[in-house]
Image: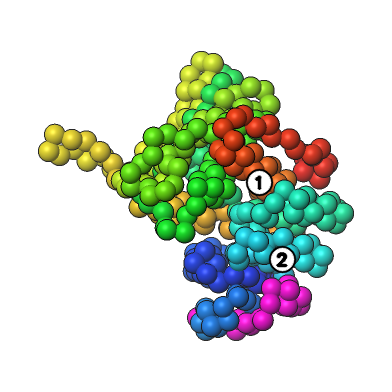
């Protein structure tokens, strides 16, 4: 049986939108980009010119309403996400939304309420680390019980540098948000409290409070330590280690080869997030396409995951500004997301 091609519309044709369009048209199988839109119409038309028979829509709502669009990808500016995700749910169309799901907990809850009213999942959130081979191997070890019950999780998120537009809150809401989501997935627990400590400032970081150390706890009492260092210069380095009752497991260094020369040994370090997670993005979209095209139930990061991550971020920003531990209080989880 031949699977039909999934006709996708992309809202937002900036850097990440263009990268996903390249992925959909040149890397993964089973999808065609049939419509695009962007706040910058010139950019949208330039992108559409490189596609076969793609329609340029004036607005995201118009794209969602296009009968030719079977599924929607949202890669626009974060504050617009709620509107487009809600419109896709109302239209009954599957929607892949890059993080954040929405920029406030209240907006995330409106999406959850709409999806629950629809009766089945339509939304997937772009937390790509869950599709990374190394993280999936780490989760297999945790779930197997080979190292006993997890007690502590260490997460490191290091960038060589960040743009001038990067603000102090972004270390939490834009950077550490991925660490928060992946640890919830790895451990299968929610985070219930967080404290944020600012280290001695990196002189290369301008006015930023960098690095940061975030200390959170899970429902069962696992300690989670998240370090963000966003001006560390040497490369884009993602760290993860779980300490269990009878052993530890950690993400391996990323270099494919180990070089020994001049009295030193080392591996290469990725230069940015695209290099580090390119395979994860590919896997993420291939699995999403296969699921939607096959009429199967979505199993990737959900609206609930988007809401929970936003709640942790909000508490983290409050803790950064106030200096005290902040509790993370979630609403009751709807049955739709409990399976």
Looking at the image, the residue that sits furthest to the top is 246
What residue range appears in magenta? 50-69
Asked which secondary structure carries label 2, the reply is: helix
Which residue is located at x 55 percent, y 72 percent? Answer: 13
Which residue is located at x 81 percent, y 37 percent? Answer: 332
Magenta stretch: residue 61 in it?
yes
Residue 5 in view of the camera:
no
Q: Position of residue 8 (x, y in %)?
A: 65, 70
Label disc, if present, on residue 323 of the rendered structure: none
Of circles 1 and 2, which is in front?
1
Residue 208 in view of the camera:
yes
Left or right of 82 on screen, residue 287: left
Which of the two residues, 268 or 329, is positioned nearer the viewer here?
329
Q: Residue beneath label 2, please?
A: 84
Colouring style: rainbow
Residue 6 vertical position relative to residue 53 in the rendered view, above or below: above
Q: Position of residue 134 (x, y in %)?
A: 47, 40
Q: Position of residue 76 (x, y in %)?
A: 60, 66
Residue contact at pointers 1 and 2, CB within 8 angstroms: no
Q: Residue beneath label 1, please?
A: 310
């Amino acid at each position: 049986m031949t699977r039909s091609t999934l006709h996708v519309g992309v809202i937002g044709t900036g850097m990440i939108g263009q990268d996903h369009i390249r992925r959909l048209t040149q890397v993964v199988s089973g999808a065609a980009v049939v419509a695009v839109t962007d706040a910058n119409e010139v950019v949208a038309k330039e992108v559409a010119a490189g596609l076969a028979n793609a329609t340029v829509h004036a607005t995201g709502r118009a794209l969602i309403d296009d009968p030719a669009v079977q599924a929607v990808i949202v890669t626009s500016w974060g504050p617009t996400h709620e509107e487009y995700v809600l419109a896709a749910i109302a239209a009954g169309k599957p929607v892949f939304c890059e993080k954040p799901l929405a920029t406030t907990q209240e907006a995330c809850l409106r999406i959850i309420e709409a999806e629950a009213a629809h009766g089945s999942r339509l939304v997937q959130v772009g937390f790509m680390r869950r599709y990374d081979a190394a993280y999936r191997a780490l989760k297999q070890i945790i779930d197997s019980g080979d190292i006993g019950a997890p007690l502590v999780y260490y997460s490191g998120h290091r960038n060589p540098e960040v743009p001038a537009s990067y603000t102090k809150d972004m270390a939490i809401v834009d950077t550490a948000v991925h660490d928060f989501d992946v640890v919830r997935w790895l451990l299968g627990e929610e985070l219930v409290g967080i404290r944020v400590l600012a280290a001695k400032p990196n002189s290369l970081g301008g006015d930023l409070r960098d690095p940061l150390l975030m200390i959170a706890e899970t429902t069962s009492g696992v300690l989670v330590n998240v370090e963000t260092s966003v001006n560390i210069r040497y490369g884009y380095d993602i760290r993860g280690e779980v300490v269990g009752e009878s052993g530890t497991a950690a993400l391996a260094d990323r270099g494919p080869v180990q070089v020994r020369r001049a009295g030193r040994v080392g591996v290469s370090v990725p230069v940015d997030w695209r290099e580090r997670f390119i395979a994860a993005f590919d896997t993420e979209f291939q699995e999403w396409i296969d699921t939607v095209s096959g009429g199967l139930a979505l199993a990737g990061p959900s609206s609930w995951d988007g809401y929970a991550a936003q709640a942790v971020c909000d508490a983290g920003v409050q803790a950064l500004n106030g200096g005290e531990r902040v509790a993370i209080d979630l609403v009751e989880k709807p049955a739709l997301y409990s399976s």
